[in-house]
Amino acid sequence: MELFIAIFTGTIIAATPLIFAALGELVVEKSGVLNLGIEGMMLMGAALAFWAVTAGCSMPVAIVAGALAGAAASLLFGVLALTFLTNQYAAGLALAIFGSGVSAFLGRGFGSVPIEALHRVDIPILSDLPLIGPLLFRFDPLVYLALLMFVAISWFLYRTKAGLILRTIGESPQTSHAIGYPVIRIRYMAVLFGGLMAGLAGAYLSVAYTPLWVENMTAGKGWIALALVVFATWRPLRVLLGAWLFGGMTILQLQGQALGLQVPSELLSALPYLATIVVLLLISRNRQMLALHFPASLAKPFRPAG
Amino acid sequence: MRFRIEQRPEPSAAMRIAAPVLASILTLIVGSLFFASLGHDPLPTLYAFFVEPLSSMNGLSEWLLKASPLILIACGLAIGFRANVWNIGAEGQFTMGAIAASGIGLFWPNPDSALLLPLMFLAGMAAGMAWAAIPAFLRARMNTNEILVTLMMTYIATLFLSYLVHGPWRDPAGFNYPQTALLPTGALFESFDPAYRLNPSIFITVIAVLVMWLFTDRSFLGYKMSVSGAAPLAARYAGFRESAAVWIGLLAGGAAAGVAGMAEAAGPLGQLSPQISPGYGFAAIIVAFIGRLNAFGIVLGGLLMSLLFLGGEGVQMTLALPSALTRIFQGILLFFLLAADFFIFYRIRVVRPARDAHVLETARVAGD
């Protein structure tokens, strides 16, 4: 039972940064923009949030600082991709490299400073329930925020007019522009939102999950989040399920190391990357399903005529 | 007075050449501001970053030594990029090339064989191609996104290298350091001059640049690849299969990166350890773009990028600035370059105030 609880809660926690980052990217891609720089934005968020904590800021301030760092980084991408119409692949890659450099630079001072992790919430009565309490009601607030974001984004995309406009822009910016929607401005907002979420994901890693700062600590989680969006065929619920799947993979890998499985630790560490390839492979074979939810204008530069 | 952005009637040839220069100058300016904000006098710091490394024989040797893998990999990658095939996992293909070549070098029964280096060359190339063949197969047959697969394969390659040097390939006489034994002399490129590290493997890069130029500018297949990237539908009507472009693009990048890994192992490294690349595979992507996906542009881009690596190391030692600066400069350079490219196709026009425009309009109507 203990082990089950540990695996279950560990999965939910490990999935949280992926949920933030992948849901943010989902909104960006739904608007027809592909930002490959999640890894860079996450690292910026992680470094800034950690720095804020060591500088004596309160936890909420630090987390907001991390999210804003991600948004600021995404603005660089936005200017290039939306105003200067550059190749979005290249602009995203530049952001990934730049973010890793800037975060390493910012983080050079706080190598092994220990910080106190984000506290979990204690809900009266609920947290003390047998079984249900430890399973569901003893997480830190960001875990709940991630789930809340899932509900909010699903509702926004499919139940509001603004969400419909965003998706229309992702399908056909030309048509949307002709109708009179400010395509570029809405895409900027989507990109900024994606940056905010990636920054939040990074902040979660450095002040709640680990909690410490290591250069390039995201270790590919930003790229896995990108893969999750494809795996989810651009649908929020599947992003959530996919994130839990990967969270579970991470936890099984850690548990496997703890149990002393007779396999090289590198093989266990490679599992999430192998799993990413396998799920991409499975999902990509079904072209029809991909095409159904794929934002038709994804990664295509758009400039209103005139 | 207002500014308006408008499309040029034709792409500007002058801007095409000026853009990388402009981007480099802007990067220098931002770099100076950055150094100034850190409390370092910008001019001496820039001097230490960009000039000092080239002011000695050893510096020049290191400059070319580092430029060589960057140019080699970028040439391979650019062939794919021209066809819109996004291999961003050259770092992994480089690692696999270095592993395979070192494996031959360490375990070949006759370490004095004259065939050793050629065998290592072939092994490195084959391993790089094999590592790239997996994403190529998945993209060509299963429609799987090659960006993500090549990147995941890079993480796996790095872990595989770590496993080898911590486990089966660890040097028993190496005081428990995670590294292999030194490669035998027969498995190493001999330096031109024992005082410096530059070695004949740079000729491989020279040949690769020429081959790349012949392929992209003088061969029908290269032309078809470019059409496939610029106008996929047209290419399909002309009977050129997309999967061919995927295979050629990825295998070219894999081969180049694998050979670069081999040259690095048989050159400056001489053995394997967990960290064998300062990010050549990723930096080569930027080099390919700075070079406009063109063979000779890539040479210039590679020399510039190599200087960034050297300068980063230099100021790390002399001014105790972190080596992360190199990545920051790489990112900024690519940002500026991409932004400058905009002005190849667009220009900024000063627009007269609306009243004048109205007057002009009236005048024209009156003239009619």
Image: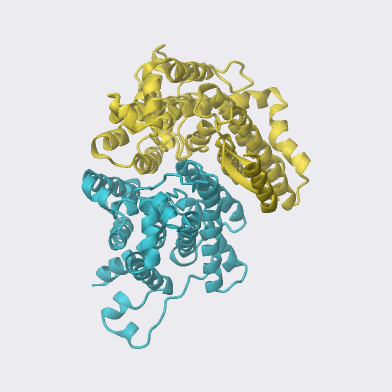
Residue A4 against residue A109 in the figure, above or below:
below
Task: Out of A22 and B123, give the one closest to the viewer.
Answer: A22
Task: Out of B143 and A138, give the one closest to the viewer.
Answer: B143
Residue A1 visible from this viewpoint: yes
Query: As drawn, is B59 to the left or to the right of B237?
Result: right
State which chain is coloured yellow: B
Residue B5 against residue A109 in the figure, above or below:
above
Q: Residue furthest bottom?
A: A125
Q: For residue B31, which quarter of the picture? A: top right
State which chain is coloured cyan: A
Q: How many marks?
A: 0
Q: Position of residue A248 (x, y in %)?
A: 29, 60
Q: Position of residue B83 (x, y in %)?
A: 39, 30
Residue B170 visible from this viewpoint: no
- What residue sits 60% from the left and 55% below the top? A106
- What residue sits 34% from the left and 24% below the top? B126
Q: Position of residue B89 (x, y in %)?
A: 41, 37
Query: As drawn, is B144 to the left or to the right of B47?
Result: left
